[in-house]
Amino acid sequence: MMRWGLGLAVALAIGCGGAAPAAQAPQAAASGPEQCTFASGTMPDAAAELLPWPTKTIPELKGVTGGGYDIEGFISEVFVPAACPPGELCTDQPPHVVVNEKGEDEYVSPPRQLAIIVRDPKKLKDGGRYKMSIAVCGTRQMGASVNEAEMRAFVEVVK
C-alpha cells in the first residue's frame, strides 16, 4: 500500500491548476464535468450513472493531463483524512482512493495506479472492482503511470 502524504496535495494543486487567474475566471465558470475543480474548493455532484466518455485502461492514461474518461480498476487504498486539530500544521490531503489496474492477486511491477479524489471514499470497498467515470487532473512525475483524477460516477463490477 502507498501513502501519499504531502506529495499528493502538492501535485493536486499543481496538476489541477489551482485557482484560476482573474483574467480566466469566465472560462472557469463554463467548465464541464470533465474539468478538475477540487483545487478551487468545489467538486461537482456525483453523476447518477457512468458518463458517455471514451474508455481507457489505466496504462493508456499515462501522460494524459486532462479530460473525462471511463476506466475499470481495483481499489487498493481508501483514504479518509483525519480532522486537523486546532493550532496544528497539517497537510490538506483530500479524500481519495488509489485504483490499480490489477487486483492484489495479479500484481504488476511497477504498479499502474491512479489517485482519484472522491467526495465519500467510504462508499467504495477496498479490493473491490469498479467501472468509473473520472476527470483526469494531471500526471505525477513520481512513480510509474500514476495520475490524479476526480471521481464523477462509479459502478461496482460483480465477479
Image (cartoon, rainbow, N blue to C red):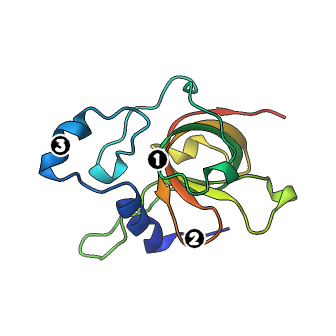
- Give coordinates of residue 138: x percent, y percent: 47, 56
Q: Residues within 10 Å of mark 2 (few under 14, many from 20)?
A: few
Rendering coords of residue 111 (x, y %): 72, 64
At label 3, the amino acid type is Ala
53 left or right of 137 in image:
right
Name the residue: 46% across, 54% down. Answer: 95
Q: Residues within 10 Å of mark 3 (few under 14, many from 20)?
A: few
Q: Which of the labelled discs sits on residue 3, or is there none? A: 2
Q: Nearer the viewer, mark 2 or mark 3?
A: 3
Residue 35 in the image: above or below residue 51: below
Q: CA distance from mark 1 to mark 2?
A: 24 Å
- Residue 25 tag number: 3
Residue appearing at x 17%, y 37% in the figure? 26
Where is 70 relative to 150, above or below? Answer: above
Asked if the residue at tag 3 contacts the one at tag 2, i.e. Cβ–Cβ closer than 8 Å, the answer is: no
Residue 47 in picture, x, y percent from top left: 48, 27
**Mark found first going from the N terminus, 1 or 3:** 3
Q: Amino acid at mark 2?
A: Arg
Quarter assignment of residue 76: bottom right
Residue of label 1: 66
Quadrant assignment for the N terminus? bottom right
Of labels 2 and 3, earlier in sequence is: 2
Q: Amino acid at mark 1?
A: Gly
Cα gap from disc 2 to disc 3, whole angstroms:
34 Å
